[in-house]
Structures are given as C-alpha cells and as structure tokens.
C-alpha cells in the first residue's frame, strides 16, 4: 500500500485507501491559503500530509479566535461531510503544507457507502469536538500566558520541529487577544528560558517547562490527539511512501 503520510487516510484498508487516493490530487498548500470560507460550503476536502491548518471564527465586530488545529492526523472539511450546514468558521494554512485534495461531493458519497470510512471519520470528528470545546473554554477562562503556552505546544505536536514562523499579530488573532498582550506574555516566557522569540520566529527551548506554564487544557487536547494517533499508528503503514509530487519511494 502506498503511504501518503496522512494518518487517517493511511489507516484505511488498501482497497478503500486506493479508492480515495485515486479520487484526489496531490497539491502544495502555501502559507495562508484559504481552504474554506466562513459560512460557505467548500468544494474540496483535504488530507494534509505535512503542515498545519487553522480553523478560525471571525465575529461581525472584527474579533477572531482559533477553535481548532488540523495536521496529518485528520482532514480539513470533515464537518462538511456530515451534513448540509456550513461552518461559522474559516480554515486556512497556518504552516506551509501539502496534502491530497478530494472533491467533497465524491468523498461524501464514499462516506455514505463505506462503514469503514464512517468509523475513521467519526473518530476524528470526536477528537475535533473535544479539542474545539476545550479551546473555547480555555479562551474564555484562562490567562493569556497559559493560553499561549497551550497554543505553542498544540502547534508543536503537529509540526516537524521546535521552530515555528509566527508573527505577534497572528498569535493575537489565534488567541483572541491584543498584540500588546502577546508581546508581554511572549517576553515573559522568553526571559524565563521557555522560548526564544525574534523576528516572527518562535523556538521552544524547554518543552517540559512550557507544559508547566500551560493550563490543563493542553493535557486534555493532547490526550485526545494521542488516542487518535495510537489508533492510526496501530494500523499497518508499511511498503511505500507517497511524497507531495505524487511519486512513490521505498522506505
């Protein structure tokens, strides 16, 4: 079986996996690319094979806050498969990515006919529901420092390294707070040796200490992600790897 790198897709049986890969197209997903607009039904779903997408709600008065992160563990557009109601949120690429793009109508038809795909998708929906609910409570109840630590750790869990290219303005939008607040709390974390932050680049220096600075929301979201990953990684993912250009290489 060709391995794409997306854990949801690669956990499927060879026949179902091949069917979905055959319906899709490998695409590059540049930074800030919009995958679906707020309150609109998208044309495509995406199985990310690298990078991270952010699901963000924008209020009528202009405020924004991130409510979910999606990496290689799942798919963008999963909620749109379940029914006709568009989401009150937009989704865009937070960190440069690649993935398999599949027409949403084709994937919805496959979801309806395949019990195996329904099981895998609904497991991911459960993980997303846990994460979204916890982030909503976190953004309302916890201080800016613990929220920033939680966000950095959640992003790191889906990234390829400890260094992330993120501006203060972007962090403020994701956390639903002011840029000046981000400047203060990021400076505090840096002075204590937890992170290094300069010119739009954040590097996690001490993950253990950053976890201590985070609220318990990080543990809840991490547990949900790890359970999903263990389910995916328990499947047989051997033989070949499919890179973003569509050519297969041996492991």
Image (tube, grey):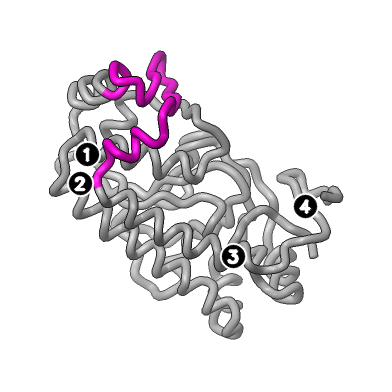
**Of callouts 3 and 2, which one flags the residue occurring earlier in the amino acid sequence?**
2
Q: Report, in whole angstroms, how far the alpha carbon at label 2 lies from the one at label 1.
A: 7 Å
Q: Report, in whole angstroms, how far the alpha carbon at label 3 lies from the one at label 2.
A: 29 Å
Residue highlighted by disc 2: 139
Q: Residue at x 58, y 76 (%)?
A: 117
Q: Secondary structure at mark 2?
A: helix
Confirm whether the magenta stretch covers residue 19.
no
Disc 3 and disc 2 in contact, CB within 8 angstroms = no
Quarter of the image for residue 127 reads bottom left
Q: Secondary structure at mark 1?
A: loop
Disc 1 and disc 3 in contact, CB within 8 angstroms = no
Where, quadrant-wise, is the N terminus in this rendering?
bottom right
Image location (x, y in percent) of residue 243: 74, 46
Region in magenta: 189-215
Q: Nearer the viewer, mark 3 or mark 4?
A: 3
**Of callouts 1 and 3, which one flags the residue occurring earlier in the amino acid sequence?**
1
**Residue reaching furthest right?**
250
Disc 2 and disc 1 in contact, CB within 8 angstroms = yes
The relative height of residue 205 versus residue 47 in the rendered view (above or below) is above
Looking at the image, which is closer to me, 243 or 123? 123
Disc 2 and disc 4 in contact, CB within 8 angstroms = no
Q: Residue at x 54, y 60 (%)?
A: 229
Q: Report, in whole angstroms, how far the alpha carbon at label 1 lies from the one at label 3.
A: 32 Å
Residue highlighted by disc 4: 241
């Amino acid at each position: 079986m060709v391995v794409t790198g997306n854990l949801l897709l690669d956990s499927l049986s060879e026949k179902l996996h091949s069917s979905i890969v055959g319906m899709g197209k490998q695409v590059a997903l540049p930074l800030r690319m919009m995958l679906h607009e707020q309150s609109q039904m998208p044309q495509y779903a995406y199985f990310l094979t690298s990078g991270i997408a952010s699901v963000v709600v924008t209020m009528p008065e202009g405020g924004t806050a991130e409510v979910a992160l999606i990496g290689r563990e799942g798919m963008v557009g999963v909620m749109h498969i379940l029914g006709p109601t568009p989401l009150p949120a937009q989704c865009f690429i937070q960190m440069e990515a690649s993935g398999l793009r599949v027409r949403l109508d084709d994937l919805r038809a496959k979801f309806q006919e395949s019990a195996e795909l329904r099981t895998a998708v609904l497991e991911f929906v459960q993980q997303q529901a846990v994460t979204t609910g916890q982030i909503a409570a976190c953004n309302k109840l916890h201080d800016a420092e613990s929220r920033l630590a939680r966000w950095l750790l959640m992003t790191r869990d889906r990234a390829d390294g400890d260094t992330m290219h993120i501006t203060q303005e972007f962090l403020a939008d994701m956390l639903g707070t002011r840029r000046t607040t981000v400047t203060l709390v990021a400076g505090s974390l840096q002075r204590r040796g937890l992170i290094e932050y300069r010119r739009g680049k954040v590097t996690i220096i001490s993950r253990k200490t950053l976890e201590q600075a985070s609220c318990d929301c990080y543990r809840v979201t991490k547990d949900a992600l790890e359970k999903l990953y263990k389910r995916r990684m328990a499947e047989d993912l051997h033989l070949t790897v499919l890179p973003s250009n569509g050519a297969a290489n041996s492991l």
